[in-house]
């Protein structure tokens, strides 16, 4: 199990089409698992002997916000909680890039204030994550 003082949430723009919402959550989850391997449990063998790869070992609520709300949330984490919360972002810049090199080139030419966030994944101190996201509704 992960540290019980940690929490993870995803916050996604609820105005996006359902396919983009699903893609955003998948991309954020991949980066979470890569950068914070402790959130993924070990592989488990079922009763028939089939080995199932480890899955996340903590709940990850998917919460709803707006484009403007995501920008504000990202700003708050950057300015006030950067030592307590790690933020993973997925932007229209990434979504519209033809490959990773194109994304890197485009992103390096933009300031944070020019980005349009599709979704954020916050992972860090439970109290800080709750403070920032406790009033956000579940994405439906």
Image (cartoon, helix red, strand yellow):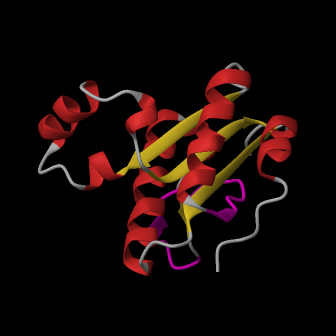
> For residue 101, what is the image quadrant?
top left
Point out residue 78 in the picture as x, y percentages from the top left corner: 61, 26
Judged from this view, the residue extending furthest toward the top is: 83
Q: Is residue 58 magenta?
A: yes
Is 86 displayed left or right of 98 in the figure? right
Point out residue 109 in the picture as x, y percentages from the top left corner: 24, 26
For the stretch drawn in magenta, what is the main secondary structure? loop
Question: Considering depth in this image, is 81 or 2 the residue closer to the camera?
Answer: 81
Is 83 displayed left or right of 91 in the figure? right
Point out residue 25 in the picture as x, y percentages from the top left corner: 48, 61
Q: Residue at x 56, y 44 (%)?
A: 71
Start and end of the magenta stretch? 47-65
> For residue 46, what is the image quadrant?
bottom right
Point out residue 87 in the picture as x, y percentages from the top left corner: 57, 36
Is 93 displayed left or right of 73 in the figure? left
Q: Is residue 16 magenta?
A: no
Please determine whether, in this image, residue 57 is positioned above or below residue 122. below
Q: Residue at x 17, y 30 (%)?
A: 105
Q: Is residue 4 visible?
A: no
Q: Residue at x 63, y 52 (%)?
A: 69
Please determine whether, in this image, residue 108 is positioned above or below residue 10. above
Image quadrant holding the C terminus, namely bottom right
Q: Is residue 114 visible?
A: yes
Q: Residue at x 47, y 51 (%)?
A: 28
């Amino acid at each position: 199990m992960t540290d019980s003082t940690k929490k993870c949430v995803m916050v996604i723009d609820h105005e996006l089409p359902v396919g983009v919402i699903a893609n955003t959550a998948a991309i954020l989850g991949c980066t979470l698992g890569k950068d914070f391997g402790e959130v993924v449990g070990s592989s488990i063998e079922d009763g028939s002997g089939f080995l199932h790869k480890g899955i996340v070992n903590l709940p990850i609520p998917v919460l709803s916000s707006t484009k403007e709300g995501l920008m504000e949330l990202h700003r708050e984490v950057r300015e006030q909680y950067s030592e307590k919360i790690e933020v993973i972002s997925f932007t229209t810049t990434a979504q519209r890039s033809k490959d990773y090199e194109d994304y890197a080139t485009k992103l390096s030419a933009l300031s944070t204030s020019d980005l349009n966030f599709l979704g954020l994944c916050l992972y860090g101190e439970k109290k800080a994550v709750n403070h920032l996201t406790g009033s956000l509704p579940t994405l439906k």
